Amino acid sequence: MSTEERLKATAKNIEGKAQEAMGELTGDPQDEAEGKAKQKEATAQHQVENVKDDIKKAID
């Protein structure tokens, strides 16, 4: 498990949520979409880390 990678993914998720909220507030659909995309990317990064953890556990 890479704590650093998980922290980066969490930061990206928070950034995405903020950007999505700002897009909703200002009525900017591009900002909103970019924020949602960042959140999905962060989720994918977390899933990759979960798979790495599962593989490491299986090996140990």
Image (cartoon, helix red, strand yellow):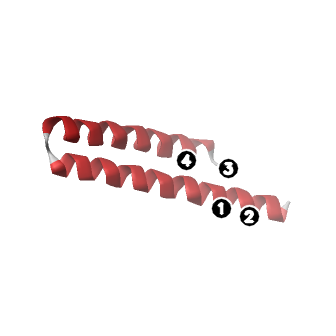
Residue on which the image places disc 1: 51
Query: Which residue is drawn at the image coordinates 63% and 48% (left, top)?
Result: 2
Query: In terms of sequence position, does the residue under pointer 1 or pointer 3 come before the other?
Result: 3
Cα distance between the residues tagged 3 and 4: 8 Å
Query: Which residue is drawn at the image coordinates 62% and 42% (left, top)?
Result: 3
Crowd class of label 4 (few under 14; some 14 to 19; many from 20; radius 10 Å): some
Kind of residue at disc 4:
Glu
Q: Is disc 2 in contact with disc 4, using a CB cutoff of under 8 Å?
A: no
Kind of residue at disc 3:
Met
Residue on which the image places disc 3: 1
Residue on which the image places disc 4: 5
Query: Which residue is drawn at the image coordinates 61% and 55% (left, top)?
Result: 49
Cα distance between the residues tagged 3 and 2: 10 Å
Kind of residue at disc 1:
Val
Q: Secondary structure at mark 1?
A: helix
Query: In terms of sequence position, does the residue under pointer 3 or pointer 2 come before the other?
Result: 3
Foreground tag (4 vs 1): 1
Q: Is disc 3 in contact with disc 2, using a CB cutoff of under 8 Å?
A: no
Residue on which the image places disc 2: 55
Which quadrant would residue 13 be assigned to in this image?
top left
- Residue 36 is labelled as none
Query: In terms of sequence position, does the residue under pointer 2 or pointer 4 come before the other?
Result: 4
In percent of width and height, residue 22 lies at 23, 36
Query: In terms of sequence position, does the residue under pointer 4 or pointer 1 come before the other?
Result: 4
Cα distance between the residues tagged 4 and 1: 13 Å
Q: Is disc 1 in contact with disc 2, using a CB cutoff of under 8 Å?
A: yes
Q: Is residue 59 or residue 28 the one in the foreground?
A: 28
